[in-house]
Image: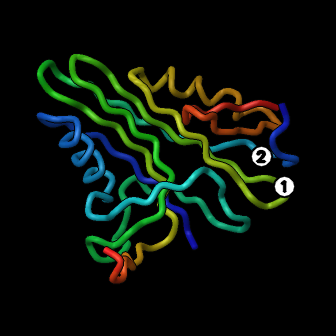
């Protein structure tokens, strides 16, 4: 299966793990944030 | 534009509380995250920062690609992102998140380490890579 006609370089990888104790929840996130945040422009349609 | 990769973990009495704590650990809990799929525009820098710097006022929207795992204990959860660019310019992120350990998550990126890989998203939202 060839989805893209691109030749990729060696990737960078970041992983993170955590243990959830009994009776609790745990979460792990890795997030790529594009640039700066911007105001939400909901307008009058809300 | 710089694309910053931040990460974090958290725990709490509910899944949402744990998720919010993990986002706080990454410095991203005060934004409205707007998820996009995984294409990196050409000529954009991707930098691993750990904790995000100040990216604007609380309540703003922030465009993200996110790997997120959440589970009730006793369990181990892992999340990961891989990223690369192409000789043509654009690049891709590849997300993995599951109830597993970090070593298993890293193995999930194995297809991305081979030359010429391509990734796509199925109808279920799962990621698939192939040459």
Residue indicated by mark 2: A9
Q: Residue at x 41, y 73 (%)?
A: A37
Q: In the picture shown, does residue B124 fall above or below B64?
A: above
Q: Quadrant of the C terminus of chain B?
A: top right
- Nearer to the camera, A45 or B89: A45
Left or right side of B73 for B63: right
Q: Residue at x 85, y 58 (%)?
A: B88
| Labelled pair 2, 1 in contact (Cβ < 8 Å) | yes
Q: How many marks?
A: 2
Callouts 2 and 1 on one subunit: no
Numbered label attached to residue B46: none
Q: Position of residue B46 (x, y in %)?
A: 59, 59
Secondary structure beneath dot 2 equals: loop
Residue indicated by mark 1: B87
Q: Position of residue B107 (x, y in %)?
A: 59, 23
- Nearer to the camera, A46 or B57: A46
Q: Residue at x 31, y 32 (%)?
A: B70
The numbered mark 2 sits on a residue in which chain?
Answer: A
Q: In the picture shown, does residue B19 fall above or below B41?
A: above
């Amino acid at each position: 299966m060839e989805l893209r006609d691109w030749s990729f370089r060696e990737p960078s990888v970041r992983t993170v793990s955590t243990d959830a104790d009994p009776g609790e929840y745990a979460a792990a996130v890795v997030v790529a944030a594009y640039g700066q945040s911007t105001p939400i422009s909901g307008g009058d349609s809300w | 534009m710089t694309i910053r990769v931040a990460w974090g973990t958290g725990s709490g009495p509910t899944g949402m509380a744990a998720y919010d704590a993990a986002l706080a650990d990454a410095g991203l809990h005060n934004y409205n995250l707007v998820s996009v799929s995984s294409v990196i525009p050409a000529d954009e820098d991707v930098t691993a920062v750990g904790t995000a710097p100040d990216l604007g006022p609380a309540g703003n929207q922030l465009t993200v690609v996110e790997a997120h795992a959440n589970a009730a204990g006793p369990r181990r959860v892992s999340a990961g992102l891989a990223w690369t660019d192409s000789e043509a310019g654009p690049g891709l992120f590849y997300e993995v998140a599951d109830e597993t350990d970090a070593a298993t998550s890293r193995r999930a990126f194995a297809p991305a380490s081979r030359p010429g890989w391509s990734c796509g998203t199925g109808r279920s939202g799962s990621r698939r890579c192939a040459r």
